[in-house]
Amino acid sequence: MGLAALRGGRDPDLPAGSHSLVDQPVTAGAVWTEWLIRYLAILRERPSGAIAAAIRAHADQGGSYDDLAAAM
């Protein structure tokens, strides 16, 4: 929702008192963008860990390097 609001150029319409800085991408300015960068950096690590676990499972199941390469 925040990215859509940022693209649209205005903060989302939310009931008074029910929003935080995260819900204000336009008026928060650089503070919101810094939050977004930190959040995306955390998310970036999660898929790499899941991929590593899947590769280990593939090896444990006797999968070949050829099949692994084709899957990737």
Image (cartoon, rainbow, N blue to C red):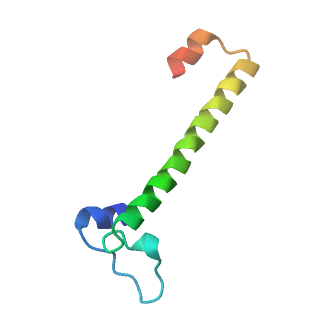
**Nearer the observer, 28 or 9:** 28
Locate residue 17 relative to residue 29 in the image: left or right: right
Q: Residue furthest bottom?
A: 16
Residue 58 quadrant: top right
**Nearer the observer, 66 or 18:** 18
Tell me where residue 21 appears, x and y as whole percent.
44, 74
- Which residue: 42% across, 89% down? 16
- Which residue: 32% across, 63% down? 4
Locate residue 1 relative to residue 51 in the image: left or right: left
Residue 48 quadrant: top right
Tell me where residue 9 appears, x and y as whole percent.
23, 68
Q: Residue furthest right?
A: 60
Tell me where residue 51 appears, x and y as whole percent.
60, 32
Screen quadrant of the N terminus:
bottom left
Locate residue 43 relative to residue 26 in the image: left or right: right
Q: Is residue 54 above or below residue 24?
A: above
**Nearer the observer, 52 or 28:** 28
Inspect this view and state whether residue 66 appears: yes
Q: Is residue 59 above or below residue 29?
A: above
Residue 36 quadrant: bottom left
